[in-house]
Structure formats: structure tokens, C-alpha cells
């Protein structure tokens, strides 16, 4: 079995995950649709990155593209994704298989349907472990119990032979996490891991992820539309809108002082973070249709601060403070306005 | 298990209804005594046979008698050398019990149908899976075309064409008859064409559905190899429609063998049915139909029970 | 005492079979090598293998290799020769005395003595048994009685010039079997022939094995000119013409019976096998309902003539293939009673149309006629034949309905007991029938004499014609012999021709595809016997 | 909304907006899809030839011509007649026979399918809509009959009743209505719980009217697809039964019967068997293709796939 270290391009010194100008386009009935449009970010060991945005903003698509999980065609992927220096975009299947699971793992929103209904959970958890290490079923089962205990599934030694439908949603999510951890990955991408769960269970799962990232030195990429989760968990946050990054930076800084009207709008719908911007309680309009993006800034139709200049060109990300960036042409005006409003 | 029991009872009832239907319908084609003894029989011989065989009893009594004997495995005696036509022999029962004749022919039909299945099931599944794993690729198009051709072709015509090509023109394989491996190739291929197509079609469409399900992405994300995802993860979940189709096609093979056995002079139950129909050998027809119907019903039952293996929910009693 | 005898016999038989095995193995090892299995692809599976079936090769192909007759026709000369009989002598017009061969043993070990022969003959010809051979061979009950241990007297209830011929039809089988296990008489023939019955796989084939104990091997006057070369015979049933041909072509079989004319032509251009054809006495003919239970309109002579004129016989002969245009009567030249003045019915569609118009003008309801043209599904190439006849009749304005029926449907409708129930019938049966007797007597009787409903076993039970004057003349002719017989029969042949009763459609040839290297001699009776088969020169 | 845990496909993206398609779009789509176009053309041609056999056939279907027997395709007979596909053993033009054979084969198939559909859909809709004892009885019957060896039962029944056009159609009705009943019942079950039926019920519509006016039109599409497939199945069955001598009886000429008759000459006159077999094959194939197309086009997800290929011509327009 190939180890990650043996893959071409492996570089200990490189960032754990470096995404550069990632684009994902789909061919569609009405032409090409850019689901992800020039997204860049890096993740360092042990770090937690939160990607925030509404549905359809390209959060999930970008993460799927990282692991090569989008079928091409219809998807067209360009840009660069480097895991420890290994290029993953258009990488050979063998490279992707090696990286998946042991380098980068991913868990999904709907845990119940994301587990194979006809295989025992223990088998599913230990499957890649057995395949990669050549272990037999018995030791695989033992390892599965171990992992299940690690994600705090009660009575693991008995439940290891159960099928997914015998578990609750929260338990399924734990199983999926256990499964993702089977090969000790360095990064875990969690795609809205709690959306489908009850509120109380959401909390438990988030706690579990948090403790895992602390104890196992696991970098976490958390996709969520829940800013509360982001504020609590993330070291860094990235806000996406219509396939583009609109703002990125350290969590505290961004939440304290958002530089993009969209971020502001999102935050304003979060009563428990800050009430600085409570007048902007709702975002008017609806998320954009990707095939019919407006000219200029995509957020313009819904933006309070939209000006004629916003129609002319698409705002690029520009550094708007220490280790943070935003993509608003009027960032300075907004800020002034806000300040004056206070 | 009450479910199992209920299914089995249902099947037995169905078999009984079929056999009864065949019994009563068979009585519509005229005097059984005349059929047995042939047009040359004297009235005295006919009357004697009617008395001996109980043909003068009311129909319901004859029916009960028939069912009663059936329970002991006695389905009557073939008309062929059935009762002596020969008054000198004083109406001796000469013929073989039909059930023996049918059972004697079963191995040949099993051999043929089994060979066809051995070809059709793996090939059909492989074609369907390949097509589903690479939608819209060249392989997909070829599979779609072949499977459509398989279900559209007339079986016996295909058999004739294969004979012309492989036996007559090329001389590679025998034209027919019962024998070993060489003899079974052409009839099995002929018989397999349709199931290959049907199995490939259903495999392709269910596998496409399965491969679009979230758990596939999960398996990919955790680093499972593609072929393993396809054959281990998806195929097991796609199994129920495929197994149902295999069951249907197995039943169809058992009856479709009638035509193929005729074309290839393959001495199975199918040829027996054709022969006995052309001889109006009613007991033999009844027995053949009863046996084939029983086989088909058993296949259906097996398919039904196999669902439990593929859907753990069913065993564990939490149906969706 | 009986028990002792039986045991003694058993021991003897064991000893004999061991000895036989030794002889056989030494023969195999030291004598001329035998050729192994001869596979013959035949068109039809026998209905049974009862001894009476030896008369009809078509229905029981190969049976004569197992069951032999007292007398047989020489395949080349057509003369009668002794087989199980060494000689025979006419006693009177209805009796023949037959001296049977001594020392012949049935395959089951029982002796073929006079008692056994008489028993076998009585079995086959007993009116009570009503075997089909009786219909084939004509009326009159044949009985046999033992004169001494080697002489049997066979007599017919009617004066019968053809009695010797009839004895060439029926097989002689073991009386022991008939007594012990009559059921097996139908499925496991026990005769005296050069091959012993092996097995019969219903639907597939039947086999026979070389009989090292055959009387003919030590007899100077054995009918076979060549010793049996084959260790076993296998008769494979293949109803498809093309399948039989392909079997010979691929070497699966050495002989295929009755290929189509196309295949015969093709064989000439192909290496490895050839087609041998020869004339037969078998006719394809159409029998149109006449006097009995027939629609009134069919009794109008103009309508009948029109129907016969509408049929393009030459065209049908071409369609059937391997056949020739028959001379307007059911026997070839040379048959006793053959009438050279009778020729094939003219093909004259215009004449037919004119006749119909005339009949119509006289008030015959021609438009109401609908002739049912029916063939039996087991007859080769029957479907195109009846379709063609239907189309020919249509083209002169006679409506038809064509049918191909299974023997089960068809046979009862041919026999008086069956068709007596069908009032006002308008049927033309298209049939094949052989006439090996070389005499018109049997033929006229079975086709044109009044059948009797009360006697369903009568020889003419399938006739559709009934005329008392004709029957009287026929009975008279049957009793006479020599030139007198010929003249009387000739007159009757003329009569039936003029009355448009039966239209002979084709005189069939028979063909065989034979693998190169085999010399196959067959007579006009077309009975397959391996003893006539040898390596080609 | 968009669920990105699935691989994204543009379907998801524009699912929210129904694309309104007119019949011209479908026509254009067919014209572009050469395989479906072929299938449609073949079926149309078949219909035209079947209906217009009397005018279109170059020769007499039963006209005997013993001089021009078994001429190979493309021959010119002694009388100067041209035989496109050759002649049969009675010298009849094979092409003409095929056209007339189509009449029998196709009408057995269509008639059988129509009758089965009428009976099956009625039974299925009633069972699905009303439920209860009626449903139990119908479905038990359906399940039972579906698990019988149908070819065998058909053979037996035809053996008893005798072959021929009418009996064949009758047997097909008896042995195929269940397929429609099962599907119609499933569709009716779905429809019964749907908003439009609930609305009709609340407005006091009678059940007969609901089934006829509300449910039936909405379940028509899948039933039409099944109907198309069943025609193909029945044409194949007819060929098999006629081949065995239990179906259509001569002088009616169905394709199966033509193969059966030509079989004797398969080595010397291959066309007698090859062409009727091909006719059945292409008919069944075309019907299957059309059914596939219809299924795809009436399915919102798959429709996209079919029309997506047509993106280019739409754009260039």
C-alpha cells in the first residue's frame, strides 16, 4: 500500500492543505454554471476552518472538489489543491485513493443515508482499515469497536454488528465520524454535520468534533450555515456567496468587525453573537441563481450599500486587515457608515 | 416464521389452482377414453376403460380422486402405450407413470437452463454494472444496444441463425441433440440472450440509482477503491430488483426452453410438452405443466426469501 | 421339474452369453474391424416399435434390423425372397404353407419354431387387435396354424392372391415376450434380426446392437449380401429437414433420410456426402369428399371436374420436389391393373372457370362452396402444398379454407367412424400413402370401396366414396387372377378417374444423404436395413 | 433546496425552475436523436404499410407463382416482376407477404395490448383507489397469475381452444392484463393521496369521475410506456406461439408463421427466415427504444439528460 509520504510532491514543510483559485463549473441545460469560482484558502495542522454561507454558495462543492468527489463531467475543475504539497486536482485515481481516508476524510450532512444500509456499521468503519493494512475481519471488528468507543457510542461491542437503520441520527453521525477517523487522517472535512440533527444532539456532535480536533491534533474544515457554530469552533472563518469567497479571516476578527455587507447580514441574524447590527435583521431577496448571476458584484441585488460602481466589475478579494480579506468595493464606505451609525 | 409460512401456503394454493385448471380444461377436449385408446377403439373397449378408470363417475368425484392420487405422487399413466389398445390384453395398464417420464426429462432442462443462467447472470450483471459505472460512455452505449437487442430478438429465430452460422457454415458445433458441453453451447446462448438483456437493463438502472446515493460518496471519501464501491457497496443494495429479475428470467427460461428445446432437439421437459401436446397425451401434459408450474412457483418463493439476505431490515423486522 | 429346467436353462444361458462375449471379443480383436456406430437421422419418432410396425418404414424406421419378416422383397429386383421362411407353397386361393428356417433364436433366447411364428402372425393380424397394418394391407383376416415343428399354414378369410406379399409386411416377434410382458412388445422389440434392440430414449433416438448370434452369419441364403459392419445402430429423431442434413454434413450422422430436393441438389456440389434418390411407390394425393356425408354441391360432376382442372399438378410436383407427375392413377406403370389410357388430370383453369359458370347457370350454388383443404402436420412439406392448392382453387373462383392439423385432429376425420358425425362436409384431404403391393386390388379397396360404420376395422374405413355397383365389380376383380384380374382392375381405374374422386398429385421419390464411403442399396419399399449397407467399392 | 452532499448535477441547479417545453421541443429533440428518430420512423412506416397494405404491396399476397419459386432478394422473375426481398416456396413476393404478415402480427400485438390495458388499468385503478377487499382480491389474482409460466399456460389454453387470431388475442388478454393492473394500482395509490385528488374529493366529486377525469390523465404517461413495451412483448409471443403451430393458422401469414414455414429452407433460402425475423426484431427494438425515450422524456430528472444533448442547437438558434 502506498503511503502518503511516498506520493510525488509530498513535502513535510508545505501547508497541510493549500487551495488556490479553485473553480468548479458545471455544464447545464442553460450553459455553464460556476458553482465555485476562484476559491483559495489554507489549513494548517490542528486548525479549524469554518466555511460559512447560504445553501448553493459553493461551500460543499468546493470541498467535494478537493477530494475529487465530483464526477467529471458534468463538473469541470480547475485551480490547485495541494495536500502536503501533493497536487489533488486532476491527480491520478491512485493518489486520490491514498489521500482519501488517510490524509483527508469527509463526513456529510445526512448521516443515515450516507451510511450503506446493507452493511454492518462495524464493517463500514473498519473497511478501509482492513483494506489498507491487510488486517483480517476479526481485528477489523476489534478496531471498529475501539473507534466506536472513541466517538462515545455506548455499548459499542454489541452494536458493532448492527445495521445503520438501527441507530438514531446522532449515533449515525458518530459512526460516520468514527469511519472517517479510521485511518487517522490529518484533516476532517465536515459538511454541515449537524444540520439534520435535533438541537440537543447537534451540540453533542459538535462537542465531539471539538474534542477530537483538540486531542488528535486533527485539522477541521467545518462547513456550516450556522454562525454560532463557527464562532464557537473555528480558528478561521471563510464566508462564501454565489461560489465566491466574500470574506475570510480569523474568526474573532471577522465576527467582531465584518468587512462585507453579506457577512454583516449573516451576523445580524445571529442574536447571540453581537447586536451591533441588529437593524439588518434579515437579508432581503433570495440567494442568486447561478446561471443568472447579475453583472458585477453578485450580492449587489440584495445589498443595502450597492452603488453604481458595484455593477461595473466584480470585486476581488483584497486584504482588508491583518490576515483577513474581503471582496467588497465599498468596504471603506460601509465601514464609515457603520461607524457613523453607532 | 408466519410470513414464510404464509408465502408457502399461498404457493401451494396457487399450484393447486393451476393443477385444477389444467384438470378441468383438459376435460374440455373430448372423451379421455377415446383419446387414450385412439380412433380405432371398439365401443366395448371404450366402455370398459371408462369403468376401470372411473370416467363414468361425476366430474367432482374424478377430480377428488385425481387430487388424492396426486398427493401420493401419482399423476396418471401416459396415453402413449397407456392402456392396451389390444383387447386381447384385456385392458392392461401398459404405460409408464407420467411423473417418471417428466422427472426423467428434468435433468436435461435443468442442464440447459442452468447453463443459460451461468452465462446470463454474471454477464448481465457485469454489463449492467459497467454501464452504470460509466454512464454515457462507449461501454454504456454498447451495453444499452446489446441489451435492447437481447430483449427484442425472437429467441427461436436467433437459435436458427446460430445453427446456420456455427453448425452449418462453420461446422464448429453440433446442430442439436443432447450431449456434453459442445451440445449445450448453442441452445444455452440462444436461451441466454434475453435474460442477459433484461438483467443488464435492470442492473444498469438500479445501479445508476444506487451510485447516486449519498453513501457512495461517503465510501469514496473514506478511500474505498472504485471497483469495491461498485461491486460491494452498491451492488448489494441494488440486489433486490436484480434478483427479482433473475427469478423472473429463471421462470421464463424454464418455459422459454420449450422453443429452444424444439429447435435444438434437446430432450428436456419443453420438448416433452410439445410432443405430448401433438399427441394429445393429456396425463403427460397435465403432469408436465404441474411440474413446471411447481418449479416456477418454487423459484418465485426462493427469490422472495432471498430478499431477506439483501435487506437486513426485513430480517430484523423493521421494514421501511 | 419346471423349476429344475428353468435353472438349467439359466445356467446354460449364462454359459452361452460368456461364450458369446468371448466370441465377440475375439471377433473384435482379430477379425475384420467393425465400424462402430452407424447414426441415421430419421424424420420421425416411431409411435411404437411393435412388430406390426415393420410394414411402415416411415413410421418405424429401422425396425426391420431387429424384427425380421418371413418373406421380404429383394431391394434390387423387387422379387419376394425368403428370410425367416426358407420356402413357401400355395395351397389354394386363400392358403399358403410356409416352411420356416430352423435353429433361429429370438433375442430373448426363445426358439423361433412354428408355434412361435403362428402365434406372432395371429397376433398381428387378429381383427380384435385392429392394428394399422390391416388397414394398410387390405381386408381379409389372416390366421396361421402349426402344421409341424417347421411348417406353418397361413390362410386368409378371403381369396387372396397377395397373401405372400402380405407376409412380407409383418414382423415376427417373440411369443415369450407377448406372454410374459406384453407391455414391452410396444417399446422393446424382440425379434430375430442382425441387431438386438438397445434402448429407446423417447424424444431422442433408439439404438440397436450387433447380434453376434444372428442366424444369417452362418447361413448361405441370408438376405443380406454383406455382413453387418456396424457394432451398433442409432436412429436419431430429427423432424427438421435442415437439421438432418446438417447432421450428415457435420459428421454427426452417416445417413439422413428424406432430404428436400434443394438439399439433394446441394449435396451434388458438396464433398463428403452425396444424395441417393430412387423412385418409390408413395403417392401424394388429394381425396375430395364424394358420396358419404359430403355436401350436395360436391356431387355435381362439373364442380368436381372444375376443381380437378384447377390444380396445376406439374407445379405442385415442382413444389414438393423429388417427385414426378403421376399418371392420373395411384399406381406406377407395371402395377397389376395399371391403365395406360388414364393420364394426369389436365391443368386447365379456363376450362374450370367455364365449367363453374355452367354449373352456376344451372342453379348450383357455387358461391356457397368452401372447400376445406386439409393436411396432416406430420406429412413433409404439407403446409405449402395445401396453401398452393387453396390458392389454385381460389384462382378459379372456388373458396377454400386451408388447414394443417395434428394427427390427433386429422386421423379421426379421415375414418368413417369420425367423419360420419360431420354432415355436409366439403373436405379435400391431402395425403401420402404407399402402395408397395404392385397390384391395384388393395388400393382400390382401401380408397374407393364403401366403408361401414358398423365395422370400424374394415379395410376401407377411410374411403369417402360409396357405390354399390362399383363395390360388386371390385369384389369380383379381387377374386380373379391373371390377365382377367388385370382387365377388371383396369376398367375400375378408368371409372374412378372419370368420376373425379381422388387426384394424384405427385409420385414421390425418396432420397437419402449418405456419407461418402458407404454403399447403400435400397428398394422401392425404402426400408432401412444395415445389412444392405457396406463400404463403397 | 440544493443538497450538496450529492454530486452536483445541473439538474439540481435548475430543478427549482420548471422548463416549459412545447411539442416542437420534443419533435426537435427526436430529430436530433437519430436512434429515436429511426425507431419512430420505423414504427410510422410499419403503421403506414399495415394500413395501406392493399395499395402499397407490390404483389398479391396469396397469388401463387410456381415458376418464380424461392428467388433470392433483388431478383427479376420470369414474368419480369421485380422481387425486392425475393420470393417464397410458392413464388409469392416476400416483401408483400411481410407487409401482410405485419397486419396480423402487429394487430395481434396491438389488440392484445389494448384489451389487456383496458381490463388491467380499470382493475388496477379501482383496486388502488378503493382499496379494501376489492384491492385484496385483484392483487391476489395479479400476484398469482404473474407467477404462472405464461407461455406454457398460453400453449395449453390454445391447445384446448385451438389456435387462430381471436383465441390468440383472448389468451393474451387473460395472461397480460395483470401487468397493467399492477402498475395502475400503484399509480392510483400514489394519486389517491395527492393534493389534486384530495381537492376533488373535498369538492364532492364522485369516485368514478375522480378516477376517470383526475387520476387517469395523470397516470397516462407511464401506462403508455408500458403499453408500448407490451406490444413488443406480445408480438414476440405471437411469433413463438405461431412458430409452435398454436398461434395464427395459415393462410393468415404472421411473421412467426413465416419463419416457421421458411425453416425447412433455411440453408437454401436464408431470406425466408432472415427477413421475417428481422422484421420482428426491428419492430420490437423500435418499440423498446420509443418506450425508453418516452420514459425519459416524461421523467423530470431524465428529461434534462435527453434535452441537454440538444443544448447546442438551442444555443445556436
Image (cartoon, rainbow, N blue to C red):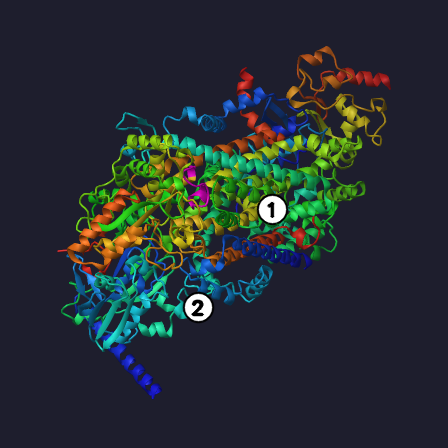
Q: SS of the residue at dot 2?
A: loop
Please tell me which of labels 1 and 2 falls first in the chain: 2
Q: Which mark is residue A130?
A: none
The location of residue C400, given as percent across then percent down, is 39, 37
Q: Which chain carries label 1?
A: B
Residue that protrudes farthest toward the front in the picture: C469
- Would residue B6 be visible to someone looking at this image? yes
The location of residue A96, given as percent across then percent down, is 56, 39
Q: What stretch is highlighted in magenta?
A: D239-255
The location of residue C324, given as percent across then percent down, is 22, 43
Relative to A70, C447 lies left or right:
left
- State the residue position of label 1: B237
- C305 vs B145, nearest the viewer: C305
Q: SS of the residue at dot 1?
A: helix
Decide: is A280 above or below A161: above
**Mark 1 vs mark 2: in front:** 2
Instruction: Please rate how many residues cluster around mark 2, counting C-alpha atoms within 10 Å: few if below 14, some from 14 to 19, many from 20.
Output: some
In the figure, residue A186 lies in which quadrant?
top right
**Which quarter shows the C terminus of chain C?**
bottom left
Instruction: Please rate how many residues cluster around mark 1, counting C-alpha atoms within 10 Å: few if below 14, some from 14 to 19, many from 20.
Output: many
- C514 vs D87, nearest the viewer: D87
Asked if marks 1 and 2 touch (Cβ < 8 Å), the reply is: no
Q: Residue drawn at (25%, 48%), measured in percent from left and top?
A: C330
Q: Mark 2 lies on which chain?
A: B
- Would residue C512 be visible to someone looking at this image? no
- What's the magenta bit mostly, secondary-structure-wise? loop
Q: Residue drawn at (48%, 63%), measured in percent from left and top?
A: B99
- State the residue position of label 2: B91
Q: Does the magenta stretch include residue C253?
A: no
**Which quarter shows the N terminus of chain C?**
bottom left
In the figure, residue D90 lies in which quadrant?
top left
Amino acid at each position: 500500500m502506498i503511503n502518503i509520504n511516498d506520493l510525488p510532491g509530498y513535502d513535510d514543510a508545505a501547508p497541510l492543505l493549500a487551495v488556490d483559485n479553485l473553480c468548479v463549473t458545471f455544464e447545464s441545460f442553460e450553459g455553464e454554471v460556476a458553482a465555485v469560482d476562484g476559491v483559495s484558502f489554507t489549513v494548517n495542522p490542528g486548525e479549524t476552518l469554518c466555511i460559512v454561507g447560504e445553501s448553493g454558495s459553493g461551500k460543499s462543492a468546493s470541498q467535494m472538489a478537493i477530494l475529487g468527489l465530483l464526477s467529471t463531467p458534468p463538473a469541470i475543475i480547475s485551480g490547485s489543491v495541494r495536500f502536503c504539497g501533493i497536487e489533488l486536482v486532476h491527480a491520478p485515481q491512485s493518489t486520490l485513493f491514498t489521500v482519501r481516508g488517510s490524509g483527508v476524510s469527509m463526513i456529510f450532512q445526512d448521516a443515515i443515508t450516507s451510511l450503506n444500509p446493507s452493511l454492518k456499521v462495524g464493517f463500514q468503519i473498519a473497511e478501509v482499515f482492513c483494506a489498507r493494512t491487510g488486517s483480517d475481519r476479526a481485528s477489523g471488528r476489534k478496531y471498529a469497536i475501539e473507534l466506536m468507543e472513541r466517538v462515545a457510542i455506548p455499548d459499542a461491542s454489541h452494536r458493532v454488528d448492527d445495521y445503520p437503520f438501527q441507530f438514531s441520527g446522532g449515533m449515525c453521525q458518530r459512526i460516520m465520524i468514527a469511519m472517517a477517523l479510521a485511518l487517522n487522517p490529518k484533516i476532517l472535512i465536515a459538511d454541515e454535520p449537524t444540520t439534520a440533527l435535533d438541537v440537543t444532539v447537534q451540540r453533542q456532535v459538535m462537542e465531539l468534533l471539538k474534542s477530537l480536533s483538540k486531542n488528535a491534533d486533527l485539522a477541521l474544515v467545518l462547513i456550516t450555515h450556522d454562525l454560532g457554530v463557527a464562532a464557537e469552533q473555528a480558528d478561521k472563518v471563510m464566508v462564501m456567496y454565489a461560489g465566491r469567497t466574500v470574506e475570510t479571516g480569523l474568526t474573532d476578527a471577522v465576527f467582531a468587525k465584518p468587512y462585507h455587507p453579506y457577512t454583516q447580514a449573516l451576523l445580524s441574524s445571529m442574536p447571540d453573537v453581537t447586536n451591533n447590527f441588529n437593524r439588518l435583521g434579515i437579508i432581503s431577496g433570495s440567494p442568486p441563481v447561478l446561471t443568472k448571476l447579475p453583472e458585477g458584484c453578485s450580492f449587489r441585488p440584495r445589498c443595502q450599500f450597492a452603488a453604481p460602481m458595484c455593477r461595473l466589475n466584480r470585486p476581488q478579494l483584497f486584504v482588508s486587515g491583518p490576515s483577513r480579506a474581503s471582496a467588497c468595493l465599498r468596504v471603506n464606505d460601509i465601514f464609515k457608515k457603520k461607524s457613523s451609525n453607532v | 416464521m408466519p410470513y414464510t409460512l404464509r408465502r408457502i401456503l399461498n404457493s401451494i394454493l396457487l399450484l393447486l389452482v393451476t393443477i385444477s385448471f389444467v384438470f378441468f380444461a383438459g376435460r374440455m377436449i373430448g372423451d379421455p377414453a377415446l383419446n387414450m385408446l385412439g380412433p380405432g377403439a371398439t365401443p366395448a373397449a371404450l366402455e370398459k376403460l371408462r369403468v376401470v378408470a372411473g370416467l363414468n363417475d361425476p366430474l367432482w368425484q374424478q377430480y377428488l380422486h385425481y387430487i388424492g392420487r396426486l398427493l401420493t405422487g401419482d399423476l396418471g399413466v401416459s396415453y402413449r402405450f397407456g392402456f392396451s389398445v389390444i383387447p386381447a390384453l384385456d385392458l392392461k395398464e401398459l404405460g409408464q407413470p407420467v411423473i417418471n417420464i417428466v422427472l426423467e426429462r428434468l435433468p436435461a432442462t435443468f442442464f440447459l437452463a442452468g447453463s443459460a443462467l451461468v452465462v446470463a447472470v454474471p454477464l448481465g450483471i457485469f454489463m449492467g454494472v459497467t454501464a452504470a459505472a460509466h454512464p454515457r460512455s462507449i461501454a454504456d452505449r454498447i451495453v444499452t444496444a446489446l441489451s435492447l437487442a437481447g430483449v427484442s430478438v425472437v429467441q427461436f429465430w436467433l437459435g436458427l441463425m446460430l445453427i446456420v452460422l456455427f453448425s452449418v457454415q462453420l461446422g464448429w458445433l453440433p446442430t442439436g441433440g443432447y450431449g456434453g458441453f459442445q451440445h449445450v453451447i448453442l441452445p444455452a446462448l440462444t436461451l441466454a440472450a434475453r435474460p442477459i438483456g433484461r438483467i443488464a437493463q435492470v442492473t444498469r438502472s438500479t445501479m445508476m440509482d444506487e451510485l447516486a446515493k449519498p453513501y457512495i460518496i461517503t465510501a469514496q471519501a473514506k478511500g474505498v477503491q472504485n471497483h469495491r464501491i461498485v461491486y460491494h457497496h452498491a451492488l448489494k443494495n441494488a440486489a433486490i430488483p436484480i434478483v427479482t429479475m433473475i427469478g423472473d428470467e429463471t421462470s421464463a427460461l424454464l418455459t422459454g426452453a420449450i422453443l429452444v428445446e424444439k429447435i435444438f432437439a434437446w430432450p428436456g421437459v419443453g420438448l416433452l410438452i410439445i410432443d405430448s401436446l401433438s399427441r394429445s397425451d393429456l396425463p403427460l401434459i397435465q403432469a408436465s405443466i404441474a411440474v413446471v408450474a411447481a418449479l416456477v412457483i418454487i423459484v418465485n418463493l426462493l427469490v422472495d426469501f432471498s430478499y431477506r439476505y439483501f435487506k437486513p431490515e426485513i430480517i430484523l423486522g423493521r421494514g421501511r | 421339474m419346471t423349476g429344475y429346467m428353468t435353472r438349467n436353462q439359466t445356467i446354460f444361458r449364462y454359459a452361452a452369453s460368456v461364450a458369446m462375449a468371448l466370441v465377440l471379443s475375439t471377433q473384435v480383436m482379430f477379425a475384420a474391424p467393425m465400424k462402430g456406430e452407424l447414426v441415421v437421422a430419421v424424420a420421425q419418432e416411431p409411435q411404437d416399435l411393435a412388430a406390426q410396425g415393420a410394414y411402415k418404414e416411415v413410421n418405424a424406421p429401422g425396425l426391420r434390423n431387429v424384427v425380421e419378416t418371413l418373406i421380404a422383397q429383394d431391394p434390387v429386383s423387387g422379387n419376394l425372397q425368403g428370410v425367416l421362411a426358407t420356402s413357401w407353397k400355395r395351397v389354394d386361393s386363400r392358403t399358403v404353407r410356409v416352411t420356416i428356417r430352423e435353429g433361429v433364436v429370438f433375442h430373448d433366447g426363445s426358439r423361433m419354431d412354428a408355434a412361435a411364428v403362428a402365434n406372432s402372425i395371429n397376433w398381428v393380424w387378429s381383427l380384435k387387435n385392429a392394428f394399422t397394418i390391416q388397414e394398410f394391407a387390405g381386408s381379409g383376416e389372416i390366421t396361421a396354424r402349426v402344421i409341424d415343428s417347421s411348417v406353418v399354414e397361413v390362410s386368409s378369410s378371403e381369396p387372396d392372391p397377395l397373401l405372400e406379399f402380405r407376409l412380407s409386411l409383418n414382423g415376427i416377434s417373440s411369443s415369450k415376450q407377448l406372454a410374459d410382458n406384453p407391455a414391452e412388445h410396444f417399446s422393446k422389440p424382440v425379434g430375430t434380426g442382425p441387431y438386438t434392440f438397445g434402448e429407446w430414449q423417447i424424444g431422442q433416438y433408439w439404438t440397436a446392437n450387433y447380434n453376434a448370434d444372428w442366424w444369417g452369419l452362418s447361413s448361405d441364403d441370408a438376405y443380406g449380401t454383406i455382413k453387418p459392419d456396424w457394432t451398433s445402430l442409432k436412429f436419431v429423431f430429427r423432424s427438421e429437414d435442415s437439421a438432418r442434413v446438417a447432421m450428415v454434413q457435420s459428421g454427426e450422422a452417416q445417413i439422413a433420410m428424406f432430404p428436400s430436393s434443394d438439399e439433394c441438389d446441394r449435396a451434388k456440389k458438396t464433398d463428403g456426402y452425396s444424395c441417393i434418390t430412387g423412385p418409390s411407390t408413395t403417392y401424394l394425393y388429394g381425396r375430395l369428399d364424394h358420396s358419404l356425408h359430403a355436401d350436395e354441391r360436391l356431387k355435381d360432376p362439373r364442380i368436381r371436374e372444375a376443381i380437378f382442372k384447377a390444380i396445376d399438378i406439374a407445379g405442385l410436383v415442382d413444389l414438393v420436389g423429388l417427385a414426378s407427375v403421376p399418371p392420373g392413377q395411384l399406381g406406377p406403370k407395371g402395377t397389376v391393373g395399371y391403365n395406360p389410357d388414364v393420364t394426369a388430370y389436365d391443368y386447365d383453369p379456363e376450362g374450370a372457370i367455364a365449367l363453374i359458370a355452367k354449373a352456376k347457370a344451372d342453379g348450383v350454388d357455387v358461391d356457397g362452396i368452401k372447400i376445406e383443404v386439409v393436411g396432416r402436420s406430420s406429412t413433409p412439406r404439407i403446409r405449402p402444398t395445401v396453401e398452393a392448392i387453396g390458392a389454385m382453387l381460389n384462382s378459379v373462383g372456388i373458396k377454400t379454407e386451408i388447414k394443417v392439423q395434428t394427427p390427433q385432429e386429422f386421423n379421426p376425420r379421415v375414418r368413417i367412424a369420425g367423419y360420419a358425425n360431420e354432415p355436409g362436409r366439403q373436405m379435400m384431404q391431402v395425403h401420402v400413402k404407399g402402395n408397395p403391393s404392385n397390384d391395384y386390388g388393395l388400393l382400390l379397396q382401401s380408397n374407393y370401396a364403401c366403408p361401414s360404420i358398423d365395422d370400424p376395422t374394415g379395410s376401407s374405413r377411410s374411403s369417402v366414396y360409396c357405390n354399390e355397383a362399383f363395390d360388386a365389380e371390385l369384389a369380383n376383380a379381387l377374386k380373379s387372377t391373371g390377365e382377367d384380374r388385370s382387365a377388371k382392375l383396369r376398367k375400375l381405374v378408368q371409372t374412378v378417374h372419370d368420376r373425379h374422386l381422388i387426384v394424384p398429385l405427385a409420385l414421390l421419390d425418396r432420397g437419402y444423404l449418405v456419407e461418402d464411403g458407404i454403399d447403400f442399396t435400397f428398394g422401392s419399399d425404402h426400408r432401412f436395413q444395415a445389412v444392405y449397407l457396406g463400404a463403397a467399392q | 433546496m440544493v443538497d450538496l452532499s450529492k454530486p452536483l448535477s445541473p439538474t439540481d441547479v435548475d430543478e427549482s425552475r420548471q422548463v416549459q417545453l412545447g411539442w416542437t421541443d420534443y419533435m426537435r429533440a427526436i430529430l436530433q436523436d437519430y436512434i429515436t428518430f429511426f425507431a419512430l420512423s420505423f414504427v410510422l412506416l410499419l403503421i403506414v404499410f399495415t394500413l395501406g397494405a392493399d395499395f402499397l404491396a407490390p404483389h398479391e399476397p396469396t397469388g401463387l407463382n410456381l415458376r418464380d419459386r424461392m428467388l433470392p432478394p433483388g431478383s427479376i422473375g420470369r414474368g419480369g416482376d421485380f422481387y425486392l426481398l425475393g420470393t417464397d416456396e410458392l413464388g409469392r413476393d416476400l416483401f408483400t407477404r411481410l407487409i401482410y404478415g405485419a397486419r396480423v402480427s402487429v394487430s395481434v400485438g396491438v389488440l392484445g395490448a389494448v384489451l389487456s390495458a383496458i381490463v388491467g388499468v380499470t382493475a388496477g385503478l379501482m383496486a388502488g383507489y378503493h382499496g379494501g377487499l376489492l384491492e385484496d382480491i385483484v392483487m391476489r389474482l395479479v400476484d398469482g397469475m404473474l407467477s404462472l409460466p405464461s407461455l406454457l399456460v398460453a400453449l395449453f389454453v390454445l391447445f384446448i381452444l385451438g389456435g387462430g387470431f381471436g383465441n390468440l388475442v383472448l389468451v393474451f388478454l387473460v395472461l397480460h392484463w395483470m401487468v397493467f393492473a399492477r402498475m395502475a394500482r400503484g399509480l392510483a395509490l400514489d394519486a389517491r393521496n395527492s393534493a389534486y385528488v384530495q381537492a376533488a374529493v373535498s369538492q364532492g366529486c364522485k369516485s368514478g369521475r375522480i378516477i376517470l377525469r383526475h387520476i387517469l390523465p395523470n397516470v397516462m404517461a407511464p401506462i403508455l410506456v408500458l403499453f408500448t413495451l407490451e406490444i413488443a412483448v406480445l408480438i414476440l409471443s405471437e411469433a413463438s406461439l405461431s412458430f409452435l403451430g398454436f398461434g395464427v393458422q395459415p393462410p393468415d401469414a404472421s411473421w412467426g408463421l413465416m419463419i416457421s414455414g421458411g425453416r425447412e429452407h433455411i440453408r437454401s433460402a436464408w431470406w425466408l427466415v432472415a427477413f421475417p425475423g428481422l422484421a420482428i426484431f426491428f419492430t420490437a427494438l423500435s418499440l423498446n427504444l420509443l418506450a425508453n425515450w418516452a420514459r425519459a422524456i416524461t421523467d423530470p430528472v431524465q428529461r434534462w439528460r435527453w434535452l441537454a444533448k440538444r443544448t447546442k442547437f438551442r444555443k445556436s438558434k
